[in-house]
Amino acid sequence: MSNDDTARIDTAQPTTLILGIGNVLMTDEAVGAEVVRRLERTHGEDARLRFIDGGTLGFSLALPIAECARLIVVDAAAMGDAPGSVRLFEGAAMDEQLGRHANSVHEVSLADLMDIARLTDTLPERRALIGIEPAHIGWGERLTPEVEQAVPHALAIIQSLLLRWND
């Protein structure tokens, strides 16, 4: 097999977008960006993965979402659980969770971006939201201890999804 054939095979594999959401200046609001940063450090060479720190969202994220075959979003989420709790919402469960919490302080909500994908028929069939319950949202550049301890759990969930989705 030539190098050209190898390149063709690699690019034919589905791309998974791993999108971290949040403001890195607002303590636990930064957890999505932190998880993506750590995952990219260990998996950045994998051509099947694309990592984006989505910040506080914006319409510019509609294109990367439309271009991916699979989507994993990591965000601080007020779910009424103990601080540092991690929950996985996959497929329709993600859609339901976003529908319940459609209010957003961001310019554009994740629900808005998912609606754009639905309207343009580019909604990834395999999609998941990993929500991490914040302990505190306020000015600060570090995660609280409860949320910091949740990061390895979120990384393990992503690893598990990637393995399952690649079968």
Image: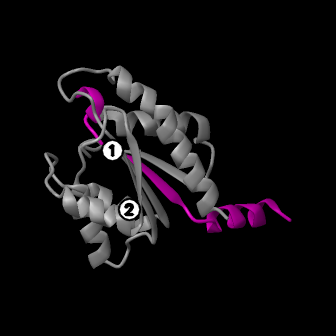
Q: Position of residue 148 (x, y in %)?
A: 41, 26
| Mark before the other along the chain sequence, 1 or 2 | 2
Q: How is the image coloured?
A: one colour
Image quadrant where one finds the C terminus: bottom right
Res. 90 image quadrant = bottom left
* Residue type, mark 2 in image: Ile
Report, in whole angstroms, how far the alpha carbon at label 1 lies from the one at label 2. Answer: 16 Å
Res. 33 image quadrant = top left
Residue 73 visible in rendering: yes
Crowd rating for badge 2 (residues with CA inside 10 Å; few <14, some 14–19, many 20+): many
Q: Which residue is mark 2?
A: 65
User: Do the residues bearing badges 1 and 2 touch, measured as CB atoms within 8 Å?
Assistant: no
Q: Which residues are magenta?
A: 1-29
Residue at image position (58%, 65%) is 14
Image quadrant where one finds the N terminus: bottom right
Residue at image position (63%, 65%) is 13
Q: Is residue 16 above or below residue 51?
A: below
Judging from the image, what secondary structure is the residue with disc 2 in? helix
* Residue type, mark 1 in image: Asp
Residue at image position (55%, 55%) is 161
Judging from the image, what secondary structure is the residue with disc 1 in? strand
Q: Position of residue 78 (x, y in %)?
A: 24, 43
14 within the magenta span:
yes
Residue 48 visible in rendering: no
Q: Position of residue 11 (x, y in %)?
A: 63, 63
**Nearer the viewer's eye, disc 1 or disc 2?**
1
Crowd rating for badge 1 (residues with CA inside 10 Å; few <14, some 14–19, many 20+): many
Q: Position of residue 117 (x, y in %)?
A: 31, 70
Res. 92 image quadrant = bottom left
Q: List the single residue furthest toward the right.
A: 1
Label drawn at residue 75: 1
Q: Is residue 83 above or below residue 45?
A: above
